[in-house]
Image (cartoon, grey):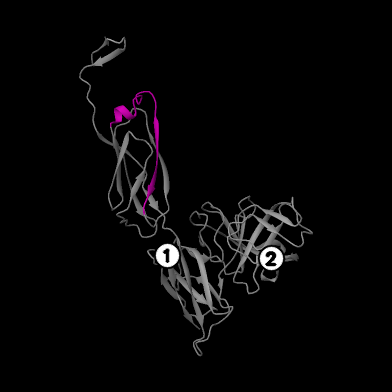
């Protein structure tokens, strides 16, 4: 046992002196990250955001890392209690991943953190659909994701608007049949992120009502749930912010709708993030509208596939979660294969049909 004694300073301050104290600088936590899609990880910008100033970090471009320091100083009561260290794994082109690692009582260092598959940031997929015979744009062409001709174990569906919130693995996904019970128009234009609509008619609306916002050519279709009405005349408050912007008057129709679930229930094979426009499920649902997490407060409704505008242009946002997509425009076969280029914020895939 180390010897210690107390010394009184000239100003009356008491100092405790301990002999033969040995401190060791070492790794307290070690871990590794991988790429969720490709497995192998390589990022020179891989870093760890750690707020504790008594600990430092070391990383490699291959995803190995260590949190280092003087464990006896950072965890002084380890013989009688455990500790938790929270930090965030960060790399360019990937979603940040917060992680908390427990330092068990009386543990031996270093503690191994669980391996983390970092998730790629989604990209935008866009392009143009033209006639193979004339080269003219094909307005209203439907672009969808289909299965690999070699039947896969996972099935990918692309949404016309990205998800509003996160959804857990195994969340149910099912076809929704939409029926309109009334309509209105916006009296004021709204921008993406808005949580309030101003309508020329709120008859039949109440908390929980489902709205469908659609442009004259249905390149944009979005669903919103009513939180409350007022206080201003025609004011409708929404439970979640809108993904898109919409013009007033005839530029947008706001339908009051109901959604009836029907058909096969698919399930997400991996959790989904807010802003994802891609669902990876155990069944491919080739339908018009999907309900995700129906029966819960997190329920969302989304159209499947993108519609080309009058000039033949289409687009998807939030594309990711898989390495390769198989795409069809107006049912053209065989499908077009596309390896997602995650280092490009915008991927371009054109069709001649």
Report x, y in % for residue 328. Answer: 50, 76
Q: Is residue 332 magenta?
A: no
Q: Number of labelled discs?
A: 2
Q: Indicate which label's residue lies in the foreground, 1 or 2.
A: 1
Q: Is residue 212 above or below residue 127?
A: above
Report x, y in % for residue 131. Answer: 52, 86
The residue carrying pointer 2 sits among few (fewer than 14), some (14 to 19) or many (20 or more) residues within 10 Å by Cα, namely: some
Is residue 216 visible in the rendered image? The answer is: yes
Observer-nearest of 247 and 267: 247
Q: Which residue is mark 2?
A: 178
Q: Which residue is mark 1?
A: 345
- Please state if 177 lies on the left or on the right of 9 as rendered: right
- Please state if 29 lies on the left or on the right of 284 as rendered: left
User: Residue at the location (38% across, 47% down)?
Assistant: 89
The residue carrying pointer 1 sits among few (fewer than 14), some (14 to 19) or many (20 or more) residues within 10 Å by Cα, namely: few
Q: Is residue 132 above or below residue 101?
A: below
First to last magenta residue range: 70-91
Observer-nearest of 218 and 33: 218
Secondary-structure class at tag 1: loop
């Amino acid at each position: 046992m180390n010897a210690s004694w107390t010394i009184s300073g000239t100003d009356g301050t008491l100092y405790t002196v301990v002999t033969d104290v040995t401190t060791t600088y070492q790794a307290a936590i070690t871990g590794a990250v991988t790429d969720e899609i490709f497995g192998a990880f390589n990022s020179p910008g891989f870093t760890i955001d750690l707020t504790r100033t008594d600990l430092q970090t070391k990383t490699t471009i291959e995803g190995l890392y260590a949190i280092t320091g003087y464990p006896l100083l950072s965890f002084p009561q380890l013989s009688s209690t455990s500790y938790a260290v929270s930090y965030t794994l960060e790399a360019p082109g990937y979603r940040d991943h917060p992680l908390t690692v427990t330092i068990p009582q009386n543990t031996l260092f270093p503690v191994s953190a669980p391996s983390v598959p970092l998730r790629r940031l989604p990209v935008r997929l866009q392009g143009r659909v033209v006639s193979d015979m004339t080269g003219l744009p094909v307005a209203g062409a439907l672009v969808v994701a289909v299965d690999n001709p070699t039947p896969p174990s996972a099935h990918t569906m692309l949404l016309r608007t990205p998800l509003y919130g996160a959804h857990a693995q195994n969340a149910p996904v099912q076809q929704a049949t939409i029926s309109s019970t009334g309509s209105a128009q916006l009296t004021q234009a709204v921008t993406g992120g808005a949580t309030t609509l101003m309508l020329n008619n709120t008859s039949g609306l109440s908390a929980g009502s489902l709205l469908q916002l659609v442009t004259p050519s249905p390149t944009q279709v979005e669903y919103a749930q009513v939180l409350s009405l007022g206080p201003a005349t025609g004011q409708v408050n929404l439970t979640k912010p809108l993904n898109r912007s919409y013009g007033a008057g005839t530029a947008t129709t706001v339908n009051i709708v109901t959604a009836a679930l029907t058909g096969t229930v698919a399930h997400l094979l991996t959790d989904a993030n807010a802003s994802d426009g891609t669902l990876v499920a155990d069944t491919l649902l080739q339908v018009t509208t999907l309900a995700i997490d129906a029966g819960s407060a997190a329920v969302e409704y989304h159209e499947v596939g993108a519609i080309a505008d009058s000039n033949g242009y289409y687009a998807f946002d939030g594309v990711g979660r898989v390495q390769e997509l198989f795409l069809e425009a107006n049912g053209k076969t065989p499908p077009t294969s596309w390896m997602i280029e995650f280092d490009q914020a915008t991927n371009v895939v054109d069709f001649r049909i």
